[in-house]
Amino acid sequence: MRRLSQLTPVAVAALLLAVWEFGVRAAAVPQFILPAPSVIAVRFAEAWADGTMLRHLVPTVTEVTVGGLLGGALGLLIGVTLGLSGSARRVVSPYLVAAQSTPILALGPVLVLWLGPGLAAKVAVCALITLFPVAISTLVAIRDVDPGTLELMRSLGASRWQSLRYARLPAARSGILAGERVAATLAVVGAIVGEWLGGTAGLGVLLNLARGSLFDTPLLFADLLQIAIVGVSAYGLVLVIERVSSKKIA
Amino acid sequence: MPILQIEGLSHSYGDRHVLRNLSLAIAAGESVALLGPNGSGKSTLLRLVAGLLTPTAGHVALVGGAAAAGRPEVGIVFQESRLLPWRTVLRNVTLPLELAGESLPSARATAEAALKRVGAGGLLDRNPAEISGGERGRVALARALVRQPSLLLLDEPFAALDAITRARLDDELPELVAGAATLLVTHDVAEALLVADRVLMLSADGAIHLEVPGLRSVPSAERRAALLSPDGAARQMRLYAALDSVSHA
């Protein structure tokens, strides 16, 4: 039964790819509109073989890693601070909600203006886009820890720091990591959009090149596949961190 | 010299008075049970003694100073076991020692001994979610005893347990607390008589209404029989009558 449930997603994917492959061939859809999966796979392999994909992958992974870690860490810090302090929460929360409601991507041109078209602006977009979901999920998780647990910690003479370390953070772990999971995929979105705003390399730049000057639709789809792999890998990395942290706190 | 001295203690939550001018002394090793209607301030009294609340009036003196949260002389067992689900049973019991700065190896040894004493020595590496309610009660008791407090506060610790487990823990409790004075809050008249030297009935406004001697000094094998003896039954009847009277006052 378990094996069946593991096989189901693979079977569904295989079925979809088969329908796509045969549908495109049967309807004679032009390759520049929608290439068949086999054509995309061949172009994906070629892009790796001639070094195109790696050249554009490295900057994107760098932006996602640096921006995601920076935004995740800052979001955690802000969330913990606001979760612990009711007065700070009352002052800052409205601004946090307002910032969350502002499309961060719209700030992209401003960030490029201030920081230039290099790595810094893209890292800033990634960091900003990841900061808010992490900050808000952390705030809620830290604030809503069971009052009985906190009373227990007080009865045991725990300091504020000890209560945070031994009770609030472990109790809030799943809420915090839920925010980190959302942030991991958003960081990839941030990097791609950041690259659209300017730059010479990156998977976002490659999207523009494939669509525009190269007019290479199979490469466009191969790039989309690579972006999806980066997103899934970032998400998987958070899941690994979850597993490791669950063993650490046990 | 009493280990706990409460004088003129009053407490209110806004306009609602839950304790009024209560005075009480507990000697070292003595066990006192508190009975009373809902809202009479029994749990509030425990929190005031534990330093988790500040009284509106009066004061609480413990051996070694005033009541303050986290004093190692005081252990507390809450109504729910409040075990941390991300820690094993052993690490739940090492927690008070870790917070006090004790090294983990030394805390482990002390916690293991405490768990063995309360009959939970076989649960060390289990998670709280994997053990029964009665076992969780024992672990919470071990956690409260691990710093060897001279006063143990018990806030209906076995209220959520099934009748058989509760009866067993009531029978064992006087021996498990290992010489610590205890202040037990309960709604159960038989439990109060079984575990305490003195049973106090609080009135609805939180003053002491009646005091009845308990059966703790009776050897454990004979305690249940003593509860059903004519004398034990008479004590129960006095407490039930008083409970009825203060509940309808």
Image (tube, rainbow, N blue to C red):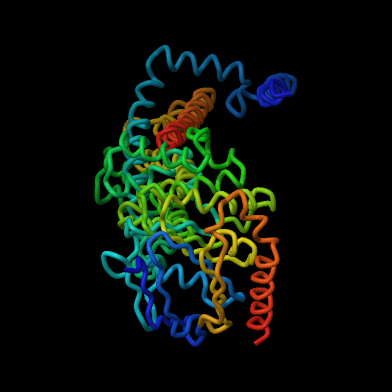
**Does A142 sit left or right of A218 as displayed?**
left
The quadrant holding residue B22 is bottom left
Return the residue found at the far front.
Answer: B230
Percent across and percent down for residue B48 are 41, 71
Identity of the residue drawn at 50% across and 49% down:
B175
Percent across and percent down for residue B217 are 52, 58
Identity of the residue drawn at 32% across and 33% down:
B105
On screen, residue B23 above or below A58: below
The quadrant holding residue B56 is bottom left
Q: Total label count? A: 0
On screen, residue A148 above or below A9: below
The quadrant holding residue A199 is top left
Quadrant where the C terminus of chain A is found in the figure: top left
Q: State whether residue A28 appears in this view.
A: no
On screen, residue B71 above or below A119: below
Instruction: Name the one closer to the observer, B56 or A173.
Output: B56
Q: State whether residue B74 appears in this view.
A: yes
Instruction: Name the one closer to the observer, A90 or B157.
Output: B157
Identity of the residue drawn at 61% across and 23% down:
A35
Instruction: Name the one closer to the observer, A33 or B112.
Output: B112
Instruction: Name the one closer to the observer, B175 or B247.
Output: B175
Percent across and percent down for residue A203 are 41, 30
Percent across and percent down for residue A153 are 39, 56
Identity of the residue drawn at 49% across and 66% down:
B32
**Does B238 sit left or right of A118 as displayed?**
right
Return the residue found at the far top.
Answer: A49
**Does A140 sit left or right of B133 as displayed?**
left
On screen, residue A20 above or below B139: above
Quadrant where the N terminus of chain A is found in the figure: top right
